[in-house]
Image (tube, helix red, strand yellow):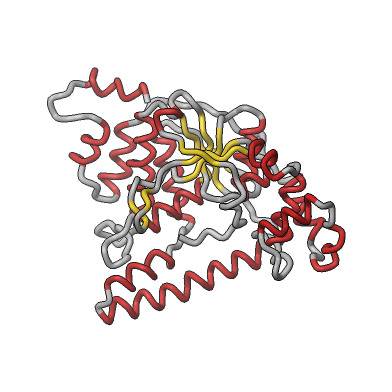
Amino acid sequence: MIIIGVPFKDLVVKEPISIDELAGKKVAIDAYNVLFQFLSAIRQRDGTPLKDEQGNVTSHLSGIFHRTLKLMQAGVQPCFVFDGDAPELKADTQAARRAIRAAAKVKHEAALAAGDIETARKYGQQSITLNSEMIKESKELIQAMGLPVIQALGDAEAQAAYMCQKGLVWAVVSQDYDTLLFGAQRVIRNLTISQKKRGTKIITPEIISLTDTLNKLKIDHKGLINVAILVGTDFNSGVKGIGPKTAVKIIQEGNIEKYKADMPKFDAVQGIFLKPAISTGYTLEWKPLDINKVKEILCQRHGFKESRIDSALGLNKSQTNKNQKSLADF
């Protein structure tokens, strides 16, 4: 999966959190972030995504249904926030990501032709794309599951962070540390990743506290943004040779002015994080899951096995309509 963002892994204060601990809590999910995650992870052995008989990619739909349903069954109330128009300063990053995907696609096809399955899988995961039809159908499935869909004006991380600041949701779910720069008080990572080993390490959900992170680093929120700008963000390349720890020291010592000449976009980038485009024209309303609509999307359109969908929903042929209505409790 291609996630660039800010390399804050060693700076943030994080601790493990279980899905059960989130029961009764509302969370805003960075939709594109998890859709790319699903497209990367849910693949065949050779790196090819899951597809229906018509050749349409379905990995993202499988991820939305099964992994989101797991959250719902645990009592979590998710909503999904979709990206709007990206700031112009993000154009270089987007172009770089497109180039990475295009190069990976060529290498994936070459590896498949050579019968090199391991290499094919590696580059298949890097060549993922998300088109408008996939986005449209993702929204449709999410809404069929009774969950709110919020269309951001700009970055979804900014919109989700705003919702967290206002107490509309308890936390933001994203792999991207940039969410902290937009002011999200709590960011949960690895929540929609199935627990698996990466090397010898099992991937588990973790929660990052913005307040605890700022206290640890002895800087304020604006200072954290400046640390990111020094290192480099999706909107600027940063100052050569400066890593996260050095950047923190520069901010702690109040020496940011010395480096502004090397960052001509400094004020513009800072403004993106401090005053992002935010939408208030939405309603957060959780509704009963529409079983028939979910099946229409997954089974009738894309050939998912109805028995597997029934099993995931806790249904079987012997259950009555009364039993099925209990799914509204999600």
Residue 276 lies, in percent from the top left, at 72, 46
The quadrant in which the N terminus is found is bottom left
Q: Is residue 105 above or below residue 86?
A: below
The residue at 12%/25% (across/down) is 318
The quadrant in which the C terminus is found is top left
Q: Residue furthest top?
A: 322
Q: How many marks?
A: 0
The residue at 43%/63% (across/down) is 128
Residue 159 lies, in percent from the top left, at 63, 41
Q: Is residue 320 above or below residue 166?
A: above
The residue at 72%/57% (across/down) is 247
Instruction: Report the side of 219 relative to 170 (left or right).
Output: right
The residue at 50%/51% (across/down) is 33
Q: Residue furthest left?
A: 318
- Using the rendered view, name the quadrant where residue 233 is placed: bottom right
- Using the rendered view, name the quadrant where residue 93 is placed: bottom right
Q: Is residue 46 above or below residue 190?
A: below
Instruction: Report the side of 11 relative to 71 (left or right).
Output: right
Choose between 239 and 86: the one closer to the eye. Answer: 239
Q: Is residue 48 above or below residue 185?
A: below
Instruction: Report the side of 194 relative to 2 (left or right).
Output: left
Residue 134 lies, in percent from the top left, at 43, 53
Residue 307 lies, in percent from the top left, at 18, 39
